Amino acid sequence: MSGNLPNTDDVLLQVPDVRCLQSAAETDHPPRILLLYGSNRECSYSRLLTLEAERLLRYFGAETHVFHPTGLPLPDDAPVTHPKVVELRGLVEWSEGQVWCSPERHGAMTGVFKSQVDWIPLNSGAIRPTQGKTLALMQVCGGSQSFNAVNQMRILGRWMRMLTIPNQSSVPKAFLEFDDSGRMKPSAYYDRVVDVMEELMKFTLLTRGNSDYLVDRYSERKESAEELSRRVHQQNL
């Protein structure tokens, strides 16, 4: 044990080392970004904002996929083999970063959006599907600007062990911000969406090759070592 740290295990206590961080150039495929939105309405402004974000991400060089929640059952109301659940979970594992966009309904994110996240397991065998992946947050409002949904999603992203970027977007009176073809009009709100997607790309490029190292924790290394020791001792009995 370290002299001033008697409660730690020297073997498992590691000093962070910049040499353990890979160069972004070592990952040669485009950043993989999954976009989720929280409405099944035919005229869904969260979907329109998500598609606007996707256009920006593709311009910045990302490979993208938008998950459409129509047909996704309520959590625990269908087996995990349901086709929409399989599709969602596969895309989550594929992604290196995500964009979450929800309308604000009754002062909160929608049930349509939360149901998608509730289908994503914290653990899938030895894999944590969302841990260490980047996350950008957006919301649309029917009235004045609010941040209730993005604030809730920020807490949710932390719970899912994601690297949520500092910037975020909230579009008030969303019905006024899109033209008849579904494209977002030029405005300060559009400029903020550009800012958020640009920042997401930068954080994803910075962290995607290093996410395993960045989220490697002393407590989990210790737990894993203790589990291994128990298994070895059981085999020797």
Image (spheres, helix red, strand yellow):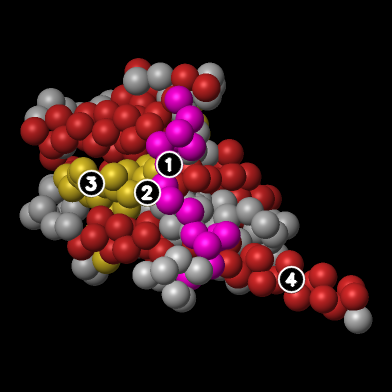
Q: How many residues crowd mark 3 within 10 Å: few (<14), some (14–19), many (20+)?
A: few
Residue under circle 3? 166
Q: Is residue 142 left or right of residue 203?
A: left
Where's residue 201, x and y in %? 34, 30
Amino acid type, label 2? Leu
Instruction: State the CA–CA distance, disc 2 to disc 3.
Output: 9 Å
SS at circle 1: loop
Tell me which amino acid carries mark 1: Asp
Q: Which residues are magenta?
A: 8-23
Dominant SS type (magenta):
loop
Q: Residues within 10 Å of mark 1 (few under 14, many from 20)?
A: few
Residue 194 falls left or right of residue 212:
left
Pointer 3 with pointer 4, Cβ within 8 A: no
Q: How many marks?
A: 4
Residue bearing mark 2: 163
- Where in the figure is residue 150, as x and y percent of width and height? 25, 56
Labelled disc at residue 17: 1
Q: Quadrant of residue 189?
A: top left
Which amino acid, mark 4?
Ser
Query: Label 1, label 2: how many angstroms apart (C-alpha)?
Result: 20 Å
